[in-house]
Image: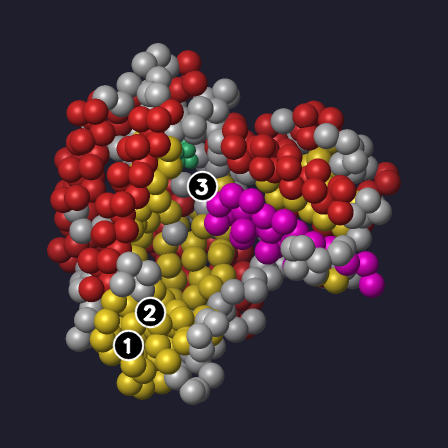
Amino acid sequence: MRRASVHTLGCRLNQAESALLLDGLVSRGWAAVPEGENADLHIVNTCSVTRGSEAKCRRLIRLLRKRSPEARVVVTGCYAELDAERIRAIGGVDLVVGTADKHRLPDLVSALDGVSPIVRNRIERRSFAIEGAGIFAETRANLKIQDGCDQFCTFCVIPLTRGRARSRRADDCVREAEALAARGHREIVLSGVNIGTYSNGGADLARLIDRLEEVSGLDRIRIGSIEPMTAGEAIVARMERGGKLCPYLHLCLQSGDDGILAEMGRPYTAASYAALFGEYAHRVPDVGIGTDVLVGFPGETEEAFRNTMDLLEALPFYHFHVFPYSEHPRTRSARFPAKVRPDIIRRRADEARALGEEKKRRFHERFIGRTLDVLFETCDRSGRWVGHAPNYARVAASSAEDLANRIARVRVEESSVAEARGTVEEVLG
Ligand code: SF4
């Protein structure tokens, strides 16, 4: 049997799409093999978020080419959309497939010799459906519900690589969710570029969540990353009422300084973000809120950075991902003056990350003496079961029982930056 491997760089959405590609290949007679194993076909699903990520994609392509000279190498993803010619120039790449045709890739590779070396078409702005259901090694499955973005933040290349905002048909989202649940996934993470803009046949994100909550076998629905201005009352209300929607969200902040937010093209202020955060914190018990922070954006003065740090300190975040600003030549901010020196960017990123660690430690500490319902995923090297609570707190517990993909109530006894630790009181199912 021909063997295929999909290598994924970048975001959760790319992971969701890679899982769908694997499913499409398997249903066409390919055997899926993990990254790092020998294969007849290597698909590289690339990322273009920074120049660093693009360089990483090129390195991986070269490595695969060298390691498996006989294998076919096919490249897709955001970087393939943005710079197909450069990827072809690496040499030994059999096919480059842009965003519009990514979902057709399992068919394209089956007839590789008859296909032109670069397939790149206009990205149509219309609702879409996707065949199959993602194949995931993990307990949690990512469900792609949306693609593209209309916001054009000045630092972001995504509207160029993935096109304008469009939504997956609601029926098709439900169909894949049912298939994922039938494969044993108890938790799905709603994925997209700007999922709060979801809109299909009268259903917005909140209505889609209502429909997904009816999927039997599914215990948890998690919102991945969401833009603050799209995470208003309808979502707060769904979380407040409980049910399958997890009390967790990744509410992208980027900066806590109004001047920098305006320069970034972000349509909210620090105060409006804090007000929304407060709404969640007040109405959704133990909500876990993570965020993205971009430090060293052009024009970010020490005072502007301090405004960001003050906001991060003031709000009870669970965790943050800190991104040092890295210029991408295809973004508007690449032309902005007042660039911040690399050593200052590094120092600010380190400071923000240190606060992020402290936030995580405090978040886990909150649960000492209390119980959390944990969906266990894996057993680590020291024999402890590790999983996540609905609010995404990472929890570890020792148990002689096989807890893989099971939900158990854990009494938390101690905590660290990495996790809350405790004892299993009861296996719930
Ligand atoms: S909202 Fe997000 S994906 Fe859209 S342009 Fe801004 S940063 Fe990029």
Q: Residue 311 in the image: x percent, y percent?
A: 17, 39
First in residue order: circle 3 vs circle 1: 3
Residue indicated by mark 3: 193
How far, Cα to Cα, is label 1 from label 2? 8 Å
Report if the CB atoms under discs 3 and 1 are less than 8 Å apart: no
Amino acid, disc 2: Val
Q: Position of residue 44 (x, y in %)?
A: 65, 44
Could you tell me residue 160's position as x and y percent?
A: 52, 28
Which quarter shows the N terminus?
bottom right
Q: Which residues are magenta?
A: 1-25
Residue 309 lies in quadrant: top left
Residue 288 in percent (x, y) is at 26, 57
Tell me the residue that label 1 is attached to.
422
Q: What is the number of the mark on residue 395?
A: 2
Circle 2 Cα neighbour tier, 10 Å, few/some/many (<14 / 14–19 / ≥20): many
Determine the quadrant in which ligand 1 lies.
Answer: top left
Q: Is residue 358 visible?
A: yes
User: Residue flagged by tag 3: what amino acid is it?
Assistant: Val
Please name the residue shown 23% across and 21% down the image: 301
Please report whichever mark, 3 or 2, sits nearer to the chain's N-terminal start: 3
Asked if the residue under mark 2 is in contact with the one under mark 1, i.e. CB atoms within 8 Å, the reply is yes
Q: Is residue 101 visible?
A: no
How many residues crowd around disc 3 within 10 Å: few (fewer than 14), some, or many (20 or more)? many
User: Does the beta carbon at disc 3 come under 8 Å from ligand 1?
Assistant: yes
Disc 3 or disc 2, which is closer to the eye? Answer: 2
Given the image, on which type of amino acid does mark 1 rest? Gly
Mark 2 lies on a secondary structure that is: strand
Q: Quadrant of the C terminus?
A: bottom left
Taking the magenta stretch, the answer to whether it contains residue 14 is: yes
Image point 41% across, 75% down: which residue? 385
Disc 1 on helix, strand or loop?
A: strand
